[in-house]
C-alpha cells in the first residue's frame, strides 16, 4: 500500500471494485505522469487485470492454457474458461496533442469491460438504446 495520503481514495476504490456485483462497464482514470512509477499504479493494474468474468462457454474444447484455476467444474467440463473482465489501455498524453493550449502531460487509463452485457444495467444498450436517433 502507498504511504501517500493522496492515494487513499484510489486504494479504497480498488479494494471495493472486485467485491461489486455490477462493476462499472468503463473506468477512466487521469493522473500525473509520475503515477506510472508508483505502487498505486502497480496495484491498479493488478486489480484490473486480475478480475475475471463468470465462466463463458467456449463451445468446444478449451484452448491450450485456458484452464480455469480454482473452478473444478470448469476444469472437468473442459468447455468453459474465465475471461479477463477488463481490457486496460494506458496513455501518456499532452493536451497539445488534442489541440488544447496547455502543455502539462497527463497519465490516462481506460479500462473497458470485455464481456458483452457485463457491467450494464439490464436492458441498457451500449449506444443508449436509440439507434440512429429513431425512437422505436
Image (cartoon, rainbow, N blue to C red):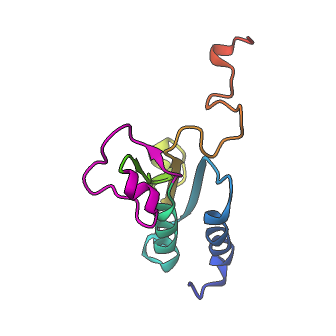
Tell which of 71 and 31 is nearer to you: 71
Query: In the current view of this chain or complex, which residue is farthest to the left?
Result: 64
**How many numbered tags mark residues here?**
0
x then y, percent, for residue 115: 51, 43
Q: Residue at x 70, y 32 (%)?
A: 124
Residue at the extreme bottom of the image, as rendered: 3
Left or right, 26 with reference to 35:
right
Which residue is pictured at 75% across the width and 12% down the height?
135
Residue 58's x, y, as percent?
Answer: 39, 41
Q: Is residue 66 above or below residue 42?
A: above
**From where the camera sits, is residue 103 visible?**
no
| Quadrant of the rendering where the N terminus is positioned | bottom right
Residue occupying image coordinates x 46% and y 62%? 71
Q: Say which residue appears at 44% left-offset and 70% top-offset.
A: 36
Position in image of residue 70 (x %, y %): 45, 67
Q: Quadrant of the C terminus?
A: top right
Return the residue nearer the eye: 86 or 62: 62
Q: Nearer the viewer, residue 6 or 78?
A: 78
19 drawn magenta: no
Picture quadrant of residue 13: bottom right
Main SS, magenta region, reads loop
Q: Which residues are magenta?
A: 53-77
Q: Residue furthest right?
A: 135
30 shown above or below 96: below
**Can the viewer see residue 31?**
yes
Judge whether residue 55 is colored magenta: yes
Amino acid at each position: 500500500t502507498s504511504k501517500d495520503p493522496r492515494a487513499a481514495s484510489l486504494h479504497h476504490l480498488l479494494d471495493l471494485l472486485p467485491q461489486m456485483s455490477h462493476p462499472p462497464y468503463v473506468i477512466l482514470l487521469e493522473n500525473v505522469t509520475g503515477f506510472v512509477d508508483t505502487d498505486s499504479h502497480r496495484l491498479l493494474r493488478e486489480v484490473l487485470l486480475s478480475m475475471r468474468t463468470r465462466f463463458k462457454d467456449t463451445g468446444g474444447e478449451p484452448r491450450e492454457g485456458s484452464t480455469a484455476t480454482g473452478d473444478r467444474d470448469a476444469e472437468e467440463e473442459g468447455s468453459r474458461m474465465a475471461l479477463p473482465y477488463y481490457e486496460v489501455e494506458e496513455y501518456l498524453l499532452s493536451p497539445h496533442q488534442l489541440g488544447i493550449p496547455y502543455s502539462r502531460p497527463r497519465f490516462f487509463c481506460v479500462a473497458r469491460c470485455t464481456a458483452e452485457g457485463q457491467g450494464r444495467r439490464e436492458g441498457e444498450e451500449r449506444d443508449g438504446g436509440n439507434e440512429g436517433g429513431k425512437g422505436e
